[in-house]
Image (spheres, grey):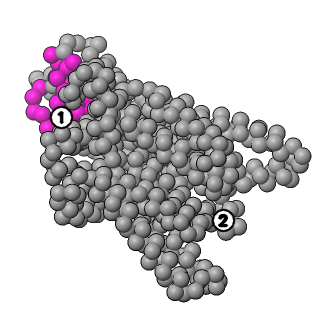
Amino acid sequence: MKRQTLWVMLAALCLALMPRLATGDDFNTADEAAFWFQRSKAFGNALARGDLQDTWQAPHPGVTTMWAGVAGHAGYAVVSGDRGWPKTGKAGERLRWWARLAVSLTTAASIALAAGLLVSLRGVPTALAAALLLAGDTFFSAHSRILHNDALNAGFLLLAVLLAAWALQREGRDRRLALAAAAAAAALSTLSKMSGVVGFLVIGVAGVVVVAHSAWTGSRTRAEAWREIAVSAGIVAGVGLATTVLVWPVMWYDPMTVVHGMQEALSLSGAAHERGNFFAGRIVPDPGPAFYPVALAFRATVLTSLGVLLAGRSLLRRDPLAWLLTGSVLLFVLLLSMQGKKFDRYALAAMPLLDVLAAIGLVGVVELVAARWFAGRERGAWAAAGVVGALTAGVPAALANPYEITWYNPLLGGTPVARDWLLLGWGEGLSEAARWIDTQGGCRDDVQVYYHQCTRPYTCTRVHGMRWRGQEDWMVGYVNQIQRDMHHDQLAPYLEREPDHVVRIHGVEMVWVWRAIEPDTP
């Protein structure tokens, strides 16, 4: 590996780590609180006692997420000397930090590796531009700071697509090694989330097209082309299966459990969300095919939005990498759109691919401008573009911190407009509400809130879900609960009153807190 490539990878790693390590335990997402910490605990305990069958925890399957949780717990245990899995208090905060750190480091490493591949594929300017866009991608970095599977899926899928592109430019041994690496990345993406199977589809389709083209142009005979396709398919299938078996211990014990689980995952993804959804100002069971294009537009940064538009020039010039990235995104979105259950985070894996596509578009325009209007001063033009790009790429993450997960594209009106189009909130703001309640009374108060598991770690009060039928001291309303008109009977009397406290994030009211209505109040 050239020294230049190593320096680019190091720069990319540093850029990626900055937003990922910027804050600590700001809030607890709904899925972390309800699922992934508990699943990681069960996965780790199963490994410790040698119960391989119990390493099956979810049909997602979230295997890399659980490994991250186990790795984070190991770091926590070494530093604190505590081998437990605390949920609340300072110990719970430290465990959450360690588990999230494992995800942050993994996704940062995927950005560094992607930048290294792009040096070979497109050169240093595109690699650095992509590193800036990937590091400044608020959607990607926000999900990289929680114990969940979407960011891991996105990082591994990005590597799978870029490794496939690298393989298609090579022949012989180099090509097969690259295909093996791409298959391993695609397998890790799929082990993170089932939608990662797109990685295998991209490798397969792109490989067949390239080999078929070589046969069409006469650089290969038909027999050689079929042989190459067969060998490549064998490598991809073999390495993909080997990676799955190596990383997921249940495969050593009972592979059929995995097969049945995958069938369950496909069945679950085809059904609409049981709690309903919200899109374009309406409560809907299934938002329909327009959902993911709209969601990605709202989740893109300003630079990525502009870069993707400018990449049209590269597509018109039949740039192979631009077409591969575009095809990968379209295939991914198409498969997701066929499912009934839709959330914007499900499309996260498309965003890093769009970031790289945007980098190609931006660099192409800078090259054109530098050649036409800065002849003889190209180095100065590149320096100026680099400074402007670095500042612009870093602004969204800086402004959105610590709630990058609630940041939306300002070109479309930002979070206030997104609130009218997309389901908002995943637990952010509840920690602030909980701490405020603690300042108002004693720890004996009863608090009723929809995301009760997200709220409990941040308050000394007794926290209950919406099914609780006792007398609350505080009622807490949450934005996506209001959007979907959930628990209307319990919230309706409070919605007619002014709240005692409101938590606002990026200009939008996310959480409302009311002191309880006395039972004898009409």
Q: Is residue 439 visible?
A: yes
Q: Is residue 271 visible?
A: no
Residue 226 horizontal side relative to residue 342, left or right? right
**Foreground mark, 2 or 1?**
2
Q: Residue at x 60, y 79 (%)?
A: 214
**Residue 195: which quarter of the image?**
bottom left
**Residue 233: which quarter of the image?**
bottom left
Q: Taking 367 as reference, is 233 above or below it?
A: below
Residue 388 horizontal side relative to residue 261, left or right? right
Residue type at mark 2?
Asp
**Residue 387: horizontal and vertical position, in percent?**
71, 35
Query: Does the segment drawn in magenta span residue 442?
Result: no
Q: Residues within 10 Å of mark 1 (few under 14, many from 20)?
A: few
Q: Residue at x 21, y 18 (%)?
A: 460
**Residue 11: horizontal and vertical position, in percent?**
60, 37
- State the extent of the magenta-drawn residues as a range: 444-471
Residue type at mark 1?
Gly
The mark nearer the N terminus, 2 or 1, is 2
Task: Name the secondary structure under disc 2.
Answer: loop
Q: Residue at x 76, y 38 (%)?
A: 383
Residue 520 horizontal side relative to residue 61, left or right? left
Residue farthest toward the right in the current orientation of the protein: 376
Q: Nearer the viewer, residue 513 or 69?
A: 69
Q: Taking 221 as reference, is 18 above or below it?
A: above
Where, quadrant-wise, is the C terminus in this rendering?
top left
Q: Which mark is residue 465?
A: 1
Query: Does the segment drawn in magenta span residue 457?
Result: yes
Q: Which mark is residue 319?
A: 2
Q: Residues within 10 Å of mark 2 (few under 14, many from 20)?
A: some
Residue farthest toward the front in the current orientation of the protein: 173
**Residue 520: horizontal and vertical position, in percent?**
11, 23
Q: Residue at x 71, y 39 (%)?
A: 386
